[in-house]
Image: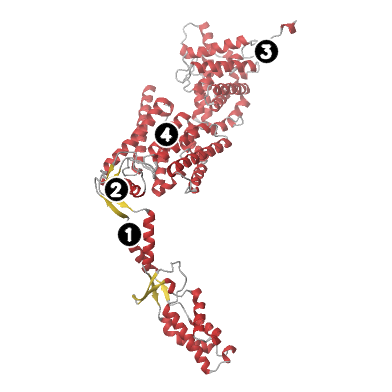
Amino acid sequence: MSKLFNSINKGFSRIFRILLFIFSAFLIIYFFPKSGKFKYSFENGRPWQSENLYAPFDFAIKKTNEEINDEINIAKINTPLFFEVDTTFINKSSDLLDERLNELNNDSLFNVYGESELVNIKTNSLKIINEVYSIGLIEENYDFKESQQVSLLLNNKVVNSTSYDKLIKPENLITFINNRIIELNIELYKSQIISLVFDVITPNIIYNKILSDESINEVTNNISPNRGFVEKETLIISKGEIVEGEKLIILESLKNEYEVNSSSFSDLYLIISAYSLLVILSLLMIVLFIRKFERNIYENNNKIAFVYFNITLIILITTWVIDVNSNYVYIIPLCIIPLLFKAFFDSRIAFFIHSVTIMLLGFIVPNSYEFIFLNIIAGVVTILTSDNIYKRANLFIAVAQITLVYMLAYFSFYVIHEGNIENLQLNNFALFILCGLLTLFIYPLIYIYEKLFSLVSDVSLLELSDTNSSLLKELSNKAPGTFHHSLNVANLAEACANEINANALLSRVGALHHDVGKIKNPSYFTENQLSEQNLHNKLSTYESVNVIKQHVSDGVKLAKSAGIPERIIEFIKTHHGTNLISYFYNKELEISKDVKRDDFCYNGPKPFSVEMAIVMMCDSVEAATKSLDKPTNEKIDSFVENIIDKQIENEQFVNCELTFKNISTIKSVLKDKLKNIYHVRVEYPELSK
């Protein structure tokens, strides 16, 4: 029945991986740019390296952005703006002046003048007002060029054309009035005339923004983006010819034609098929690599989903940024990919996935060679410098180094392309700094992914290594001997892992938790027995074996209820593998010869990682050496050799990638550490006499 269940489970896992692969590939292909890609690379000022290039089809020569902007600016100046003429106040000017004069009749300034003088003030004031209205007084000063053409409308008909500088602006009105007063030789009445004019006059020229914008848009929309035409089979550039000037413009126009108008050279469905094949091959390479070298990731649905999710997400983000503005492509923190995969897996898979993802993105980004080179180098630096990112200082140092590498590589490319640094724009370096700051988002991202995909990073391992956690505190209170044993095993495992470049922190955390199941029945284990009375003496050998074996399943239950990640629970399951409980097996053999060996073996599974194997070795050796009477160097060496060789003989390490060199190194570390623990010293015969 269990075999059937395992077979069904494997079948579902296989279907899940296939569907995940298809869904990821579909998303990436769907959002990939649906255009062709120009197969030649060229740079301004450098020789054309390929063979003579002939036009593969008819295409237009595109104007540069500078040329188009210049034409738009000229068109805006030559296109007249429209202002409405309001004649309401012109007809009412005389009446308004009379009303104002009546109001000021009692004013002392006006009382000094006679009837004829008042008529003169009114006449000249009205004359100045009419002159202002005839020229045109606008309501506010607009941000137009002084030479901008203006059409004046009356009842939707153009009645006059002038330039913007000829119109009277509000701030220029006082100057105009003063000049007219001097010309009319009426300076004696200056203050009265100015007061009257400003009281009566109102802007009579109103800007018609809707009509003006429509006129400008109509003209600018008619500006052609092309300034020439190249016929099919025309020689564009010869091999060795310098790419510059007109040649550069024609090549950029041809490249743009490939990328924008794919129907001009091939069928759109053919391009989509080609991109689909490219995406599928890239994802397949990653899957096959994981299956070959990281089998435990391949067979874990959560882990393989994590891989697909991050590859798809980073490709979709990059595609979106390119669609918005390709100049911001270097803001994307692509180095988060190797950081994440190294945090959850290892450096090898981090580098491979990062490299394949970057090469895939190289087909959709501008300056693909530069992009791939920069990001591959940055990825290598990330992997080399991001050890122990659970330490905050290490992460900041790694991000600073990544940012510096980006800047130096970009600077080198710029100098190679341009041959100078005169036009080097500092805002490009600001993009790399922003990219570095976004990379620091790795901390919250790790936490989110741990919850979403049930993964464990070194950051979480550091938290789990705290012996003040509730589960380890309970172990120290209820089974102090086991807790002390776990601390010793953790120290030994960490030292061994460091020597063979395994995950020392994972080994330590696994060792700390491997015996938590002994909380249930602590007094049945010798390290917790305070008196000479042994509870196993009251049990049969089979009952004793069941109690001993029970601590593994109890440990799994306790760890799950305490929220311990599965990655650590695996240490609880595997720390005894399928080893024989030899004491009770031999005891039963003395009673009966008809004994099944399997009944006295742990249920497994066997360790399937290097770290699990290390914990098994350290656990067995640390527990066994406590039974040594007067340990010496020779006894400890022999004991370590015998215990580990017995485990090898029982094929406990067949599922993990331990080499003979690793095992030899682990043995040496254990021997040295145990000698220090038991204080084995050289005897001095002369002192013993």
- Mark 3 or mark 4: which comes first in sequence? 4
The picture places residue 113, in percent across and down from the top left corner, at 56, 92
Lower sequence index among marks 2 and 4? 2
Q: Quadrant of the N terminus?
A: top left
Q: Disc 1 designates what residue?
A: 223
Residue position marked by numbered label 4 in the rendering: 355
Is disc 4 surrounded by few (<14), some (14 to 19) or many (20+) residues within 10 Å? Answer: many
Q: CA distance from mark 4 to mark 1?
A: 44 Å
Residue on which the image places disc 3: 681
Q: Amino acid at mark 2?
A: Asn
Identify the residue at image location x=58%, y=13%. 537
Q: Amino acid at mark 4?
A: Ser
Residue nearer the viewer, 640 or 31: 31
Q: Which is more toward the observer, 601 or 308?
A: 308
* Quarter of the image with the C terminus in it: top right
Horizontal and vertical percent position of residue 373 = 43, 37
Q: Which mark is residue 261?
A: 2
Mark 1–mark 3 distance (CA, rounded to whole Å): 95 Å
Callout 3 amino acid: Arg
For residue 499, say whether it is visible: yes
- Indicate the colouring scheme: secondary structure
* Element on which disc 1 rests: loop
